[in-house]
Structures are given as C-alpha cells and as structure tokens.
Image: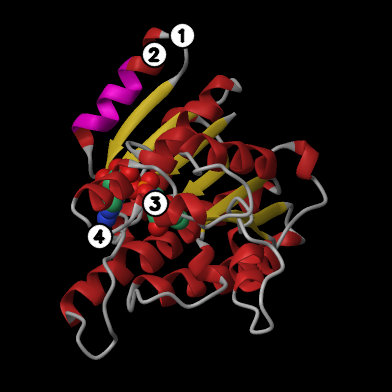
C-alpha cells in the first residue's frame, strides 16, 4: 500500500514516514528539503523498505496535481495521505505581524494541506478507499499569540471536518492529529534561539512527557489503520493532557493541587 507524506523529510512527517514504512507501506516523501529527504529514503531503503523522494513546494497547486498523477502511475494506488509540511511561527501580535510572512505561512500550512488533499483525495475517492490524516495543533482548538499559525491550524480543523463529510460516503476517512509542542528540529531550533522555553513546555501537560515526533506518528498510524475503521472527522489531541491541564490550572477559585 502506498503512503504519501508531505514534509516527510523532517520532524513529525519524518516520524510518520518511518512508522508507515515499518508497517510495510511503500512511502513517498514530498518535501522541499531534498537532501534530508534523500537521507531518510537511503536509510529506509538500506533497511529493506520501499521509500521514494519527490521534491516539491506544497503551495504550488499545479505541481501537487501533477505529482499526484506521477506517484499513482509510478508507485501504484495511494491509500494513505499525510499532509504534514508546515512552518512554525514566533510569538507576535496581529497588528505588528509581517503580512508577507503571514501570507507565506498560510500558503504552506493551509493552502499546502488543501492542495495536497485535493490532488490525491480525488483519486482515493474514485477508488472508494483511503485515509487522510491532517496535522493540526492545539492551535486548532485554542488561540495562541501566533497571528498566522494559530488561525491556519483552526482552518485545517474545519477543512478536515468538511472533507470527512465530502469523502466519507466514497470510502475515504479523513481525520487529524493535534499535537502540543513536539520536539522536532523546528521546535528545537526555537528552543535554542530562545523563542520557546523548554521548562515551560515540560510543566505544561498533565503527564510528565515531552511529546516527541514518534508519539504523533503512533496516533497517525492508528487513525490510518483498520482499528480506526469507524473513526472519521476527528481531530485527535496528542498533547500529554495540555488542554485539560491548562484550563484546570486557570481556575479562578484556586487549584487544590500544589504540583500542577
Ligand atoms: N513541532 C511542534 O511543536 C508542532 C506542534 C503541532 C503541530 N506541528 C505541525 O507539524 C508539522 C511538521 O512540523 P515539524 O515541527 O515537524 O517541522 P519540521 O521543520 O521539522 O518539518 C517540516 C518539514 O516540512 C517541509 N516543508 C516546509 N515547507 C514546505 C513546503 N512549502 N513544501 C514542501 N515541504 C515543506 C520542511 O522541508 C520539513 O522537512 C507542521 O504542520 C507543524 O505545524 C508541529
């Protein structure tokens, strides 16, 4: 079975690629990071898996359409699709943000996910089989001071729900995962530059786990598997209890718990 992962050369996408390859899927990495993608492919091929790299910018709608055709003809029917390519953002306000950077982030995070789902989803629907898992975020459910990123992840939640309905009767399930801070190269770079605080991250969940890409990949794999045959239209938090803990801790009547 062929699985396509955009952003599969690094971080959460790479972890999904490795997890799906380990399950026996033939994997296609679609990424701008050609060198890193080729390294992942080499690694997997040497371990006996089937892996392929395709260079692309997910914000290029027509390129995504032509890649979908190419991959279907070269690798066979695509049954799993993970639009994971995305860029992070540093804190800022709506009034002060750089509008060009805002537009580029939307082109990649939202439009890239949309182009990918349309390009591959059409054929999946025609065949009546497949599973798509979007990468949302805790930002899909709550506002953060990330003026481009936060709304883009909310939009991905809504897109996921709409496609779950449009594709559902044609045999394609559509879900998402909503990770909290996840220790990917993108997040590590922001921790190193002082844009994120690892100590705050460590204390933010309900359990003592700093989420790693493999935790997200496990959830993605579950949603793609037959074990999730009755699940569609769901954005599954992979947040170590972040959402519950954050609301709990903000209770104005006080928190009867000293180490939360
Ligand atoms: N790291 C986190 O804390 C976190 C939390 C929640 C959600 N996410 C989401 O997970 C996804 C992956 O993020 P990550 O932290 O693994 O980042 P990452 O930088 O480690 O990996 C992102 C990959 O996407 C690729 N990419 C970026 N723009 C692209 C484009 N226009 N076309 C093709 N490929 C492109 C990059 O080359 C890279 O390989 C993103 O959607 C991000 O929003 C991350």
Kindly report the secondary structure that dominates the magenta region of the rendered protein. Answer: helix
Vertical placement of 130 versus 51: above or below? below
Mark 2 or mark 3: name the one nearer the start of the chain: 2
Residue 256 seen by the camera: yes
Mark 4 or mark 2: name the one nearer the start of the chain: 2
- Give the residue at x 58% y 74%: 158
Disc 4/disc 2 C-alpha distance (Å): 36 Å
Q: Which residue is mark 1?
A: 48
Q: Is mark 1 within 8 Å of ligand 1?
A: no
Residue 31 seen by the camera: no
Q: For residue 36, what is the image quadrant?
A: top left
Report crowding for label 2: few under 14, some 14 to 19, many 20 or more residues within 10 A (C-alpha).
Answer: some
Give 250 or 55, whichever is nearer the viewer. Answer: 250
- Give the residue at x 23% y 69%: 104
Report crowding for label 4: few under 14, some 14 to 19, many 20 or more residues within 10 A (C-alpha).
Answer: some
- Give the residue at x 34% y 22%: 41
Q: Which residue is mark 2?
A: 45
Q: Which residues are magenta?
A: 35-42
Q: Which residue is mark 4?
A: 195
Contact check, label 2 and label 1, Cβ < 8 Å: yes
């Amino acid at each position: 079975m062929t699985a396509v992962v955009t952003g599969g050369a690094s971080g959460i996408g790479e972890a999904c690629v490795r997890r799906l390859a380990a399950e026996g899927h033939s994997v296609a990495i679609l990424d701008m990071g050609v060198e890193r993608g080729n390294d992942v492919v080499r690694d997997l091929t040497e371990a006996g898996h089937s892996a392929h790299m395709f260079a692309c910018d997910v914000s290029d709608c027509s390129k995504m359409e032509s890649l979908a055709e190419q991959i279907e003809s070269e690798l066979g029917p695509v049954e799993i699709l993970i639009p994971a390519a995305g860029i992070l953002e540093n804190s800022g306000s709506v009034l002060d943000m750089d509008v060009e950077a805002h537009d580029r982030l939307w082109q990649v995070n939202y439009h890239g996910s949309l182009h990918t789902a349309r390009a591959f989803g059409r054929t999946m629907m025609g065949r009546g089989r497949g599973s798509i898992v979007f990468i949302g975020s805790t930002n899909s459910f709550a506002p953060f001071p990330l003026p481009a990123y936060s709304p883009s992840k909310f939009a991905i939640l809504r897109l996921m729900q709409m496609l779950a309905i449009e594709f559902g009767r044609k045999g394609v399930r559509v879900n998402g995962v909503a990770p909290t801070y996840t220790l990917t190269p993108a997040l590590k770079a922001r921790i190193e530059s002082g844009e994120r605080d690892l100590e705050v991250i460590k204390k933010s969940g309900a359990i003592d786990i700093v989420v790693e890409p493999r935790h997200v990949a496990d959830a993605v794999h579950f949603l793609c598997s037959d074990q999730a045959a009755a699940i569609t239209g769901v954005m599954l938090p992979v947040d170590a209890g972040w959402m519950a803990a954050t609301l709990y801790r903000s209770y104005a009547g006080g928190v009867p718990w000293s180490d939360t």
